[in-house]
Image (tube, rainbow, N blue to C red):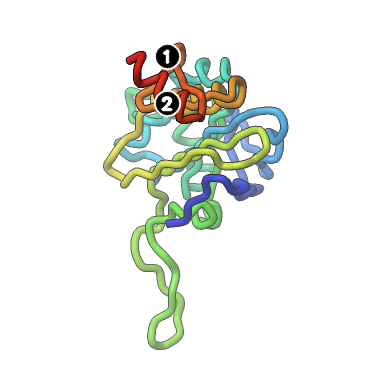
């Protein structure tokens, strides 16, 4: 798997559904460069089981991300029309109505490939015909992109394993704390906790104070 941390986030232009029902054809992350942090996450498919729990959980905590000047963007290999239909479906009927942040269509699977979360790969058989091995869906990848467009954190779960939205918020807090203060965040650090200076003396002082 590709490690994208420290590298420029792969950009794209793709169809997306924004504000819970508006289809835009050329949605791009470029709009955030120099302005906002981005949590870009991938999920396997619309109208499934674990996926709506995550999508709705991100919506439930959306104000926390907004307080941190962070945009949330979801991506799957479904079409924008599938996204739109799911967004119009009531939760009691298996839908995600009420979700307002963008859901991007990766119908070509190129975004998933560029972020190396596609659960399969293209190839050719003995007759030279194109084939696909694996599942043409995305793993549960999550990428924190800073305001310069650089990936600063990534984590990828297998499809049955849901993510912690609180952990995504914690990582945003840790990155912003480091940028603002120059101190580094030790294990299990949360906003408001003691951090440490990135020196041997700083580590010693932190450990002595525990």
Query: From the viewer's perspective, is residue 143 above or below residue 168?
Result: below
The location of residue 122, given as percent across then percent down, is 44, 69
Q: Is residue 12 left or right of residue 177?
A: right
- Residue at figure coordinates x 45%, y 39% from the top left: 142
Around disc 2, counting alpha carbons within 10 Å, would you say few (fewer than 14), some (14 to 19), or many (20 or more)? some
- Decide which of tag 1 and tag 2 comes sooner along the chain: 1
Q: Is residue 70 left or right of residue 34?
A: left
Image quarter where the N terminus lies is bottom left
- Residue at figure coordinates x 68%, y 44% from the top left: 26
Q: CA distance from mark 1 to mark 2?
A: 15 Å
Q: Nearer the viewer, residue 3 or 29?
A: 3
Q: Nearer the viewer, residue 192 or 154?
A: 192
Residue 22 visible somewhere in the drawing = yes
Around disc 1, counting alpha carbons within 10 Å, would you say few (fewer than 14), some (14 to 19), or many (20 or more)? few
Q: Nearer the viewer, residue 92 or 203?
A: 203
Residue 90 visible somewhere in the drawing = no
Query: From the viewer's perspective, is residue 99 above or below residue 5?
Result: above
Query: From the viewer's perspective, is residue 16 above or below residue 137?
Result: above
- Residue at figure coordinates x 44%, y 28% from the top left: 168
Q: In the image as oriented, which residue stretches furthest toward the top? A: 192
Quarter-of-image position of residue 206: top left
> For mark 2, what is the residue?
203
Secondary structure beneath dot 2 equals helix
> For mark 1, what is the residue?
193
The location of residue 10, given as percent across then percent down, is 61, 50
Do the residues bearing badges 1 and 2 touch, measured as CB atoms within 8 Å?
no
Quarter-of-image position of residue 57: top left
Q: Is residue 6 left or right of residue 60?
A: right
Secondary structure beneath dot 1 equals loop
Q: In the image as oriented, which residue stretches furthest toward the bottom? A: 127
The location of residue 150, given as percent across then percent down, is 61, 42
- Residue at figure coordinates x 41%, y 41% from the top left: 155
């Amino acid at each position: 798997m590709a490690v994208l941390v420290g590298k420029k986030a792969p950009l794209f232009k793709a169809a997306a559904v924004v504000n819970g029902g508006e289809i835009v054809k050329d949605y791009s992350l470029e709009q955030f460069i120099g302005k906002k942090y981005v949590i870009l996450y991938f999920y396997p498919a619309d109208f499934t089981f674990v996926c709506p729990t995550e999508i709705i959980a991100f919506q439930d905590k959306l104000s926390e991300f907004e307080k941190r000047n962070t945009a949330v963007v979801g991506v799957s290999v479904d079409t924008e029309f599938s996204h739109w239909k799911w967004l119009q479906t009531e939760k009691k009927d298996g839908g995600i109505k009420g979700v307002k942040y963008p859901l991007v269509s990766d119908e070509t699977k190129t975004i998933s490939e560029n972020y190396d979360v596609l659960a399969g790969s293209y190839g050719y058989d003995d007759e030279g015909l194109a084939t696909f091995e694996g599942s043409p869906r995305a793993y549960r990848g999550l990428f924190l992109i800073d305001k310069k467009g650089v990936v600063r954190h990534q984590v990828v779960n297998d499809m049955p394993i849901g993510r912690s939205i609180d952990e995504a918020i914690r990582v945003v807090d840790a990155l912003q704390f480091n940028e603002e203060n120059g101190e580094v965040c030790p294990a299990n650090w949360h906003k408001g906790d003691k951090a440490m200076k990135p020196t041997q003396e700083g580590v010693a002082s932190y450990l002595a104070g525990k």
